[in-house]
Image (cartoon, rainbow, N blue to C red):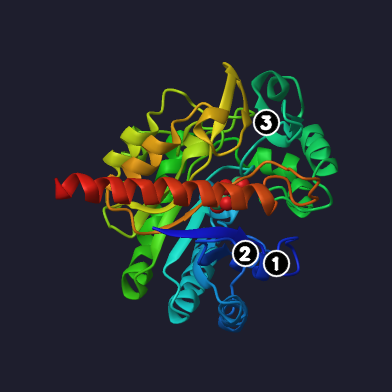
Amino acid sequence: MEMTLRWYGSKSDSVTLKQIRQIPGVTGVITTLYETAPGDLWSREEIHARKAEVNAAGLNLSGIESVNIHDSIKIGSPDRDKYIDNYIKTLEHLGEEDIHLVCYNFMPVFDWTRTELARVRPDGSTVLAYSQKAVDSIDPVKMFDSISSDSNGFVLPGWEPERMAKIKELFEMYKDVDEETLFANLKYFLEAIMPVCDKYDINMAIHPDDPAWSVFGLPRIIINLPNLQRMMKMVDNRHNGVTFCSGSYGTNPDNDLPGMIRALEGRIHFAHVRNLQHNFPGDFEESAHLSSDGSFDMYEIMKALYDIHFTGPIRPDHGRMIWDEVAMPGYGLYDRALGATYLNGLWEAIVKGEKCHAAK
Ligand code: DNO
């Protein structure tokens, strides 16, 4: 595996490439052209410039998160082919720049959903948290207002103001879209892009819906192993793979995370590894990466990735806000650096333990 950190670009991130370069064991970044809108065509020049900037800092550009999918594609609107063409051209440009991993999601209207961006934990750190009760009692527009006022001035991925300005319209557009329609529209999209992925060896890694169930009555399909298996079978190509995000699948305690990883061998192209604490059904908060701080066994998650010979990029995903850092919630430097270091430590111990075992 390659340890990486997500980086939004120098215009949009409080963390610098120099800082990332100094985290031991982090050799790459996962980035995006954050200022583009879903459906836009990414120019080769812009991609080239981003890559050159990352490389000049001594880091690899290990993948893109995300090239977002236009709603017309998810809804299956008559104009979807135009946006699929743009997507294909963007993939061509990425391939020409020798970039081989693209993370994306197929969630209607919202990307990830949290009800609080700064819940205080017993140690005084603040974290992203979710309460089903809060979701059930709030209008999505109001939720957007409270989320944006808590975001430390940063635009959160998937919660862009231009998008939220159209939220009522978006809900209306999705009113006839159910799970089956979403599956069919995902299939149509994947079938259209697989030839370019084959040509440039681009791994598409779908991100799970977070949380892994329907919110605000919207359908959500990338939530568990049976649905992932259906998705991979309906377009059976190894470039049609997944981002295994422990924090997203783990929102549902019925998802057996190490078991899912083992069942997805060969199709996990990217991993997001973080911990969560389940408080009671329908209420969870993000925790430090350390197993004992949350509900997951992080050793077992890393061991499962080792057992399936995972070689792709991994990132510590979100972190808590600690040491008075002011950054995009979930995306500060300090706790993600601690997380990366902890995950690297687990990995080293697993690798050495296995070698020792093999030698006996
Ligand atoms: C949240 C992220 C998601 C993810 C997208 C992928 O912090 O994990 O926003 O990047 O769903 O398209």
> Residue at position x 48%, y 75% from top?
94
Q: Under tag 3, what secondary structure? A: strand
Q: Which residue is mark 1?
A: 16
Query: Crowdedness of circle 2 by 10 Å Cα count: few (<14), some, many (20+)?
Result: many
User: Is 310 positioned to the left or the right of 113 in the image?
Assistant: left
Q: Under tag 2, what secondary structure? A: helix
Q: Which residue is mark 2?
A: 20
- Mark 3 vs mark 1: in front: 1
- Quadrant of residue 10 within the rendered picture: bottom right
Residue 52: % across, % down: 58, 82
> Residue at position x 65%, y 37% from top?
113
> Residue at position x 56%, y 79% from top?
55
Q: Earlier in the sequence, mark 3 or mark 1?
A: 1
Foreground pick, 118 / 243: 118
Question: Contact (CB < 8 A) between labels 3 and 1?
Answer: no
Query: Crowdedness of circle 3 by 10 Å Cα count: few (<14), some, many (20+)?
Result: many
Vertical order, 274 against 34 (above or below): above
Q: Under tag 1, what secondary structure? A: loop
Q: Amino acid at mark 3?
A: Ala
User: Is 216 positioned to the left or the right of 105 in the image?
Assistant: right
Residue 3 in view, yes or no? yes
User: Is 354 positioned to the left or the right of 161 in the image?
Assistant: left
Q: Which residue is mark 3?
A: 129
Q: Earlier in the sequence, mark 3 or mark 2?
A: 2
- Mark 3 vs mark 2: in front: 2
Q: Amino acid at mark 2?
A: Ile
Residue 187: % across, % down: 38, 50
Instruction: Tell me the quarter of the image containing the C terminus.
Output: top left
Residue 213 in view, yes or no? no
User: Is 306 positioned to the left or the right of 80 in the image?
Assistant: left
